Image (spheres, helix red, strand yellow):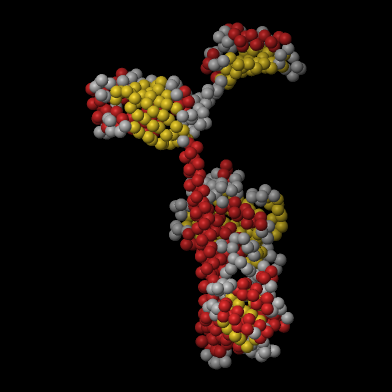
Amino acid sequence: MNEIYAGMTQLAAGETKSPVDRNFSNTNKKKTVMKEHAKPTELIFEFDLSSSCRWVNDDAAQKFGDVRGQSLAQVFSAYPKVIEQYQRIDIGHEFIYFEVPDAYNWVIQTVRDDNGQLTGAVVTASALVAESPPLVLPSSVWAYNLLTDQLTVSEAVSLVFGFTDTAVDFSAARSAMPIPMGMLRDGCRRLFLRDAEFFLKEFQFKDATDRVRWVSVRGQVSSIDSSGHVIGLNGSIEDITARVTELNNRHDLEYKILRVQKMEAIGELAGGIAHDFNNILTSIMGYTELALMESLQETNSKMSTYLQEVYQGGRRARELVGKMLTFSRTDQIQPQNFALMQQVKDIVKMLRASLPSSIEIRIDIDEGLPEVFIDESFLQQMIMNICINSRDAMPDGGTIYIRGRTRLVRRGRCDSCHSEFVGDYVELSIEDTGCGISDTMLNKVFEPYATTKEEGSGMGLAMVHGIMHRQGGHIMVDSLHNDGTEIRVFLKPSESYGINSPIEPYVEVSREENTTNKHILVIDDEVSLVYFLRELLQKKGYVVTVASDSHEAWDLFSATPDKFHLVLTDQTMPGMSGVQLAAKMLTLREDLPIILCTGYSDVVDETNINQYGIMGYMPKPINTKELLESVKELLVV
């Protein structure tokens, strides 16, 4: 006993083997405690009309030996029920099934030739499937005796661990199941050394059928000898797999919700930035146009060139803000004609920030391609999703090839919707030099949550599928495992196409006809923008009153509502929004023409403006030419 406790002290100090381990090693008494989980075998015997065995399969020969030529009675002397059931063939039975407890399932079936004549019978024995561990381990108890090194568990625990019995040698069990037994041993050691009154451990392991389980194990001292030494422990085992799985699922759901909320917050932030930035851009581009109008009256050509460049810079900034907003307006589908080359270049510029320098992008798009009619945000999202998948398939770097060409499809089959398609298409191909997709995964790449990555939602290509089929397109995927992937997207060309001409600043300086008596009220909380609009409209001959506050505007209008022929108002303002202000004004003047301007709004846009009684809509940054045309048109009405 003293040797055992001396050994336990050494074990606590870090020695790898307990005295019991050494005893087993030295005497070679370690026994196999794990059940073998072999695949159930099937034994097949064929007998002729004289009941003589004429053929057996390999499994039967291994179990029964070479019994060819032996009689039925000799072969199955240990199984009299087989001999008894075989006699039923003589009275016309064609198929006989029965079981021998703790042995085999048996099938006896007659064999006939092409003429229907009986030629013998086949006997098949299938091993009974061993009892499987329970799906949920019931709460169980365990006990350990240090003197005998015997661990005693319940029948259910024995099945889960794959033990041959409910009482096993602990040291041998620890070698067979190192993780759970090792965790149990660490807790037991503290109790033996009286370092704790009890232990409670939760851990994960794979059971005898390789199913992942979580258990909670509690242990305490159960018996002490006359010298005060602990010689026995016991405790409980509880299956907490369902609880841990639910907790993990909850954490995953919370993480996904946080991501959604984060994206919504980014969308809101982008909208707010866009509103303020569009106001600034309207002032920059507007005053540049005013400066250009003045410069035309002079001979300074360099000044005009410089101002043209300022205006074009503002226009590009406006387009950048629009691209930011496409990701916060996923519910608004606005298909337009787009030149594929320019769109791909713009998207690649945005994409490069998320690609490592070890990945090269090569673009090869044919000149003169037809424009494609698609929602811009959809096109951006589709290309970015595919390229990000390509990035993840090339962790050590590689090349992404983006190609565009016209294609006459004579007979195509979509790998996404599995329908056949024919006709003229614009083909956009995105190919990478990555690891490719396995044949098994290739059949379900468009399914939601299907992913080959350890981290990822598996929604990338599922979203591409949705985008393409909402736009009337199709997809084909070519991939070999470890040899790259090519995704070909087929887009319907627009009915009319051509190269978009750049937007030029508005520099017309002549006054509009019949504008002298037309009075316009301009409202915007951005002072510089109000002054620009006043200057612009006055140059065209209109009488202009401005207000930088919605309440101030209401006071001006309500005092003399018939004084104003048209109202031009911003949407997002302190106090009252543009829609609210318009509603109040329309109570005094039902026929009042109102143009609403906004850089970003999740309340109103050009599709629903009429329901508020507002006649005109102008997105920011304001296009001067379009604004003046809209003002002129509404004043005529």
Q: Is 44 or 459 nearer to us in this picture? A: 459
Extreme residue in the front direction:
559
Quarter of the rendering occupied by the N terminus: top left
Residue 379 image-quadrant placement:
bottom right
Regarding residue 312, the answer to whether it shows in the image is no
Q: Residue at x 71, y 9 (%)?
A: 90
Q: Which residue is drawn at 63% across and 68% down?
A: 604
Regarding residue 204, the answer to whether it shows in the image is yes
Considering only vertical position in the picture, is 493 above or below 127?
below
- Left or right of 228 on screen, residue 178: right
**Count of numbered marks:** 0
Residue 78 image-quadrant placement:
top right
Q: Is 212 or 221 nearer to us in this picture? A: 221
Extreme residue in the bottom direction:
298
Considering only vertical position in the picture, is 517 above or below 46?
below
Considering only vertical position in the picture, is 324 above or below 461?
below
Q: Which residue is drawn at 25% across and 33% down?
A: 13
Considering only vertical position in the picture, is 267 above or below 453?
below
Percent coordinates x, y for residue 136 in the rendering: 51, 31
Percent coordinates x, y for residue 448 in the rendering: 59, 48
Percent coordinates x, y for residue 41 in the rendering: 55, 22
- Left or right of 30 on screen, residue 76: right
Residue 593 image-quadrant placement:
bottom right
